[in-house]
Amino acid sequence: MKTEPSLPRQSAASWLALFGSAGTLVCCALPILFVMLGLGATVAAVTSVAPFLVTLTLHKTWVFVGSGLMLLISGWLLYRPGRACPSDPALGRLCARAERWNRRIHGISAALWGVGFFAAYLALPIRIWLGV
């Protein structure tokens, strides 16, 4: 008999994916954006206050792989076949509402991960290729 992952487990996976993808944005995309805008002193000040950001940046491949895996697991929990909300009307409404929020959080997480990936791995090669 198959057991469905509980709603708290699904929500936890969605929140972990959100924080993981936000970590990619904080470690890689925002510093690049600030430097491009001429705010290098801001990056220096933030990294002196929060030195763990330098460690995240040094290990950005692992940060992206870990957060990408969290996104994949969260997406599988959300979109796998055979999912259904309870037939009880009150529980069904709560389940549908929680599922909508989980899907929104997952979408935001995927978008943040995509922005971070573009900034960390694609922006510079594209800029070099264009000769800008």
Image (tube, rainbow, N blue to C red):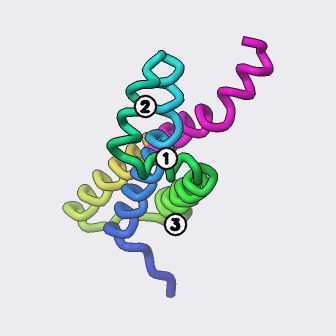
Q: Earlier in the sequence, mark 2 or mark 3?
A: 2
Give the residue pinned by disc 3: 82
Residue 43 image label: 2
Q: Residue at x 49, y 63 (%)?
A: 77
Query: Extreme left residue here?
Result: 90
Task: Measure the alpha-carbon separation of dots 2 and 3.
Answer: 47 Å
Task: Name the residue at 36% across, 73% down.
Answer: 6
Look at the image and say whether residue 116 sits in the magenta stretch: yes
- Kindly indicate the quadrant of the structure image that contains residue 11: bottom left
Q: Residue at x 80, y 20 (%)?
A: 129
Magenta-highlighted residues: 109-132
Q: Could you say where residue 122 lies in the image, as x and y percent from the top left? A: 68, 32
Q: Are marks 2 and 1 in contact (CB under 8 Å)?
A: no
Name the dominant secondary structure of the magenta segment. Answer: helix
Q: Which residue is mark 1?
A: 54
The residue lying toward the viewer, choosing from 34 and 4, is 34
Residue 30's place in the image compared with 100, above or below, is above
Q: Amino acid at mark 2?
A: Val
**Amino acid type, residue under disc 1 in the picture:** Val
Label 3, secondary structure: give it.
loop
Residue 98 is situated, as x and y percent measured from the top left of the image, at 30, 55
Residue at image position (62%, 33%) is: 118
Of 13 and 25, which appears nearest the observer? 25
Q: Quadrant of the C terminus?
A: top right
Q: Is residue 64 left or right of residue 23?
A: right
For this rendering, which residue is in front, 7 or 129? 129
